[in-house]
């Protein structure tokens, strides 16, 4: 098994765009109950892994004692290979000396900070609790504690976001002591407050302009795109996320967490804390992917990655060259292609699927 994911489903508030499974804890007792059941699920998956990723939710909502309780269970049950990567996601307002020291003590070697923007108006609009000054303070603290592998997440493309401010945010974050930047195009998901409020994205031309701008600024400062939304300094690609994108096996624990066993079994824990606590195995949903689903996934994921998609017969996309750069038998979407990636993946899938003799050479 390659990757181990732990979902901590608690947040202090719910950001207005977020569709991850999370709740605002009603009491400390509720968190204790969760940790008790989570420990059982972690124990059942004792094994060697290459990576651990603690996400959420907001993992650093856990106080000192609860963090230690969780990490003790992890280190007793989850064995890590050499050159492991152990990431924890953090909300800036809850980063402090106390929790950073605990992360260091237990061997966490990668931090992922959800900063989203460095403009206070935008942060407030999205319902975030931190402000720009918090990010600067916390980045400084993280550097002083000696963490050498740090990611920041940013969001772009909302109508309320300003192109000039986006440029300013980019120029500020490239000077942080960080190794990785995840840049997410805002998506307005069903069931979120942004959907109910009918929040719009910027028009396509502006989004393309923002994409080109980030590409230019990040490359200028040594961050290279290895996945359509992710940039890293050399040698600092996120090992855990690469497991997902390369369809390697992983286990996810906690409510809403998904697991994948190569080549075709996927299962997902229930998105409901009460049912998870009652019997997490009973409410798990299993999916067995057929060959067509596997092919579509491989196409879609390969197009997202820097390596691109290898085709046996490149002529099947000869009328789509405005969307790709071609390297031998390999295609990589250009910016125009990235803007319509989902549709392109389906189009290529249908073309391959309709020719019985033609197969992806990388399959
Ligand atoms: S974006 Fe993060 S902090 Fe905000 S509600 Fe979602 S999981 Fe919680």
Image (tube, rainbow, N blue to C red):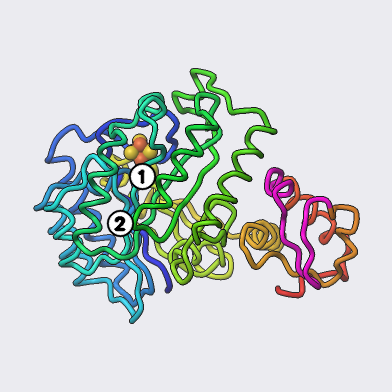
User: Circle 1 is placed at which residue position?
Assistant: 114
Task: Evaluate whether residue 280 shows in this view.
Answer: no
Residue 25 drawn above or below residue 83: above
Could you say which is closer to the camera, residue 144 or residue 278?
A: 144
Taking the magenta stretch, the answer to whether it contains residue 346 is no
**Ligand 1 in which quarter:** top left
* Drawn side of residue 18 relative to residue 248, left or right: left
- Region rendered in magenta: 322-342
Task: Evaluate whether residue 105 shows in this view.
Answer: yes
Q: Residue 235 location, x and y as percent? A: 46, 71
Locate the C terminus and report the quarter of the image it occupies: bottom right
Q: Residue 116 location, x and y as percent? A: 41, 40
Could you say which is closer to the camera, residue 130 or residue 119?
A: 119
Taking the magenta stretch, the answer to whether it contains residue 333 is yes
Q: Residue 198 location, x and y as percent? A: 54, 19
Q: Residue at x 22, y 64 (%)?
A: 146
Nearer the N terminus, badge 1 or badge 2?
Answer: 2
At numbered mark 1, what does the secondary structure look like: helix, strand or loop?
strand
Extreme-left residue of the structure: 65
User: Circle 2 is placed at which residue position?
Assistant: 88
Residue 327, disc: none
């Amino acid at each position: 098994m390659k990757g181990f994911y732990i979902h901590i489903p608690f947040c202090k508030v719910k950001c207005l765009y977020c569709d991850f499974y999370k709740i605002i804890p009603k009491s400390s007792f509720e968190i204790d109950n969760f940790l008790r059941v989570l420990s059982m699920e972690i124990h059942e998956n004792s094994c060697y892994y290459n990576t651990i990723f603690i996400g959420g939710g907001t993992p650093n909502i856990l106080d000192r004692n609860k963090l230690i309780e969780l990490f003790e269970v992890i280190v007793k049950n989850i064995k890590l290979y050499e050159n492991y990567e152990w990431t924890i996601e953090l909300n800036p307002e809850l980063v402090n000396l106390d929790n950073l020291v605990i992360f260091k003590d237990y061997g966490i070697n990668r931090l992922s900070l959800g900063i989203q923007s460095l403009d206070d108006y935008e942060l407030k609009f999205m319902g975030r609790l931190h402000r720009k000054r918090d990010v600067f303070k916390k980045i400084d603290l993280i550097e002083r504690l000696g963490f050498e592998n740090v990611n920041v997440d940013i969001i772009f493309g909302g109508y309320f976001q300003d192109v000039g401010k986006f440029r300013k945010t980019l120029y500020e974050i490239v000077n942080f002591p960080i190794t990785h930047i995840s840049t997410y195009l805002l998506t307005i998901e069903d069931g979120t407050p942004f959907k109910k409020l009918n929040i719009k994205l910027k028009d396509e031309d502006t989004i393309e302009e923002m994409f080109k701008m980030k590409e230019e600024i990040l490359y200028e400062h040594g961050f290279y795109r290895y996945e359509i939304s992710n940039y890293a300094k050399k040698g600092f690609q996120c090992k855990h996320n690469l497991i997902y994108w390369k369809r390697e096996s992983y286990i996810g624990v906690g409510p809403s967490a998904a697991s994948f066993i190569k080549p075709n079994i996927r299962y997902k824990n229930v998105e409901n804390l009460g049912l998870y606590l009652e019997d997490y195995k009973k409410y798990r949903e299993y999916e067995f992917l057929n060959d067509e689903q596997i092919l579509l996934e491989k196409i879609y994921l390969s197009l997202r990655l820097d390596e691109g998609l290898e085709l046996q017969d490149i002529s099947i996309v000869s009328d789509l060259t405005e969307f790709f750069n071609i390297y031998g038998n390999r295609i990589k979407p250009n910016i125009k292609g990235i803007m319509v990636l989902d549709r392109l993946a389906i189009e290529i899938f249908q073309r391959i699927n309709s020719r019985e003799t033609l197969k992806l050479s990388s399959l």
